[in-house]
Amino acid sequence: MSSCTQAVEYLMPCQSFLMGIGEITPTCCQGAQALAKATVSPADRKSVCQCLKQIALSINVNVDKAKKLPELCNIKVPVPLQPDVNCDTLNRGPGA
């Protein structure tokens, strides 16, 4: 993952859903899936987590909607889309 901007671009189609004012779309799921595939290393996970945490706070993400995104898109997201996540714990990787 090269930048925070890139991570945000992947999830841009999900903005209205994550804010609780729209429905989930195929484009949103495609972006979330692309982000999941691009976020592979522990450093990537931590970097993307910190980025998304700031974005979640700035656009007032609906936490309940954010928690449903992986299930609705049928993907495993390596980074929680929540403003209260501890990004330091993501260095360990999944299942650690």
Image (cartoon, rainbow, N blue to C red):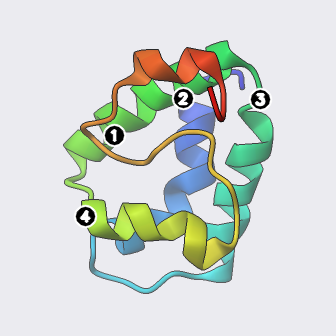
* Residue 24 image point, x, y percent: 51, 81
Q: CA distance from mark 2 to mark 3?
A: 10 Å
Q: Which mark is residue 55?
A: 1
Give the x, y percent position of residue 90: 53, 23
Quarter of the image for residue 20 reads bottom left
Question: In the image shown, does 23 or 71 lie closer to the viewer?
Answer: 71
Measured from the top left, where is residue 96 in percent x and y?
62, 25
Near mark 1 (Cα within 10 A), the count class, few <14, some 14-19 or many ≥20, is: some
Amino acid type at image mark 3: Val
Depth check: give the residue in front, 9 or 18: 18
**Residue type of the residue flagged with mark 4:** Asn
Residue that lies at the very extreme toward the bottom in this rendered image: 23
Residue 16 image-quadrant placement: bottom left
Marks 4 & 3, CB-CB < 8 Å contact: no
Q: Nearer the viewer, residue 3 or 95?
A: 95
Determine whether the residue tagged by mark 2 lies in a helix, strand or loop: helix
| Label 3 Cα neighbours within 10 Å, binned few <14 / some 14-19 / many ≥20 | few
In the shown orientation, is residue 15 left or right of residue 32? left
